[in-house]
Amino acid sequence: LLIRLDLAYRLDHSTVMPRMSEISIEQARSDLARFLRYVRKHFPMTGFARRLEYGLYTGYHFHVLILLNGYRVQNDVALGFLQSQHWENVITEGQGRAFNCNAKHYLSRGIGMIDYHDLPTRRILLERVAPYLTKVDFWMEFDGGGKSFTRGQMPTVAPLRAGRPRVHHVS
């Protein structure tokens, strides 16, 4: 089950021209790390990919793809909503905003519940969703290194085997 979220900060409307929030890159990364810990703790996360971007009017923001165990949870729209609300209200204490891409109806949808054998949807994921997370950003340059794209994978756990173990005969 794939959930795609855009996580950002609210614009400052106290001036005539709305301007980006003054969140530092360190604060943005810290907020995202806290968000991912929350998702790991409360949802059956199997991995994630995230892209940090900088916009002239939006400041630092993230495009996040969260992979959940589809055998344990369903309803990507509701789960994306819960995660968005946590970003907005808890992680950023009301200073954040989130867009739940799973709630939007796309003609070619490469997110949500994707069956292993659903090759057309997997192709959309690989050719449209994933490349957006890895595109070149012309506005951002890191001082002293840093990555705009990262991915994470949860530790693998030995699969559960049903039934009695097989007996191996030695000749």
Image (cartoon, rainbow, N blue to C red):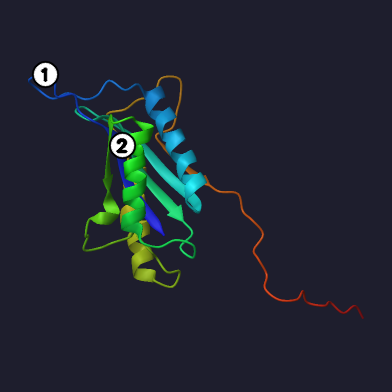
Provide the secondary structure element on which disc 2 rests. helix
Farthest residue to the left: give it. Answer: 16
Circle 1 residues within 10 Å: few <14, some 14–19, many ≥20: few
Q: Is residue 77 above or below residue 39?
A: below
Looking at the figure, which quarter contains the C terminus? bottom right
The image quarter in which residue 18 lies: top left
Q: Secondary structure at mark 1?
A: loop
Residue marked by disc 1: 15
Quadrant in the rendering for residue 60: top left
User: Would residue 121 be seen by someone viewing this image from the given angle?
Assistant: yes
Location of residue 42 in the rendering, given as x and y in whole percent from the top left corner: 48, 48
Which residue is pictured at 56% across the width and 48% down the height?
Answer: 154
Across and down, in percent, residue 13 comes to 14, 24
Instruction: Answer with mark 2 or mark 1, whichever residue precedes in sequence.
Output: 1
Tell me if residue 98 comes above or below residue 75 in the rendering: above
Is residue 47 shown left or right of residue 31? right
- Tell me whether circle 2 and circle 1 mark residues in contact (CB < 8 Å): no
Q: Residue at position x 35%, y 48% from top?
A: 82
- Depth check, mark 2 against mark 1: the one in front is 2
Cα separation between marks 2 and 1: 22 Å
Q: Residue at x 49, y 39 (%)?
A: 37
- Quarter in which the N terminus is drawn: bottom left
Q: Which residue is mark 2?
A: 88
Q: Nearer the viewer, residue 43 or 125?
A: 43
Which x, y percent locates residue 40?
Answer: 50, 45
Of residue 107 and residue 159, the one placed in the foreground of this image is: 159
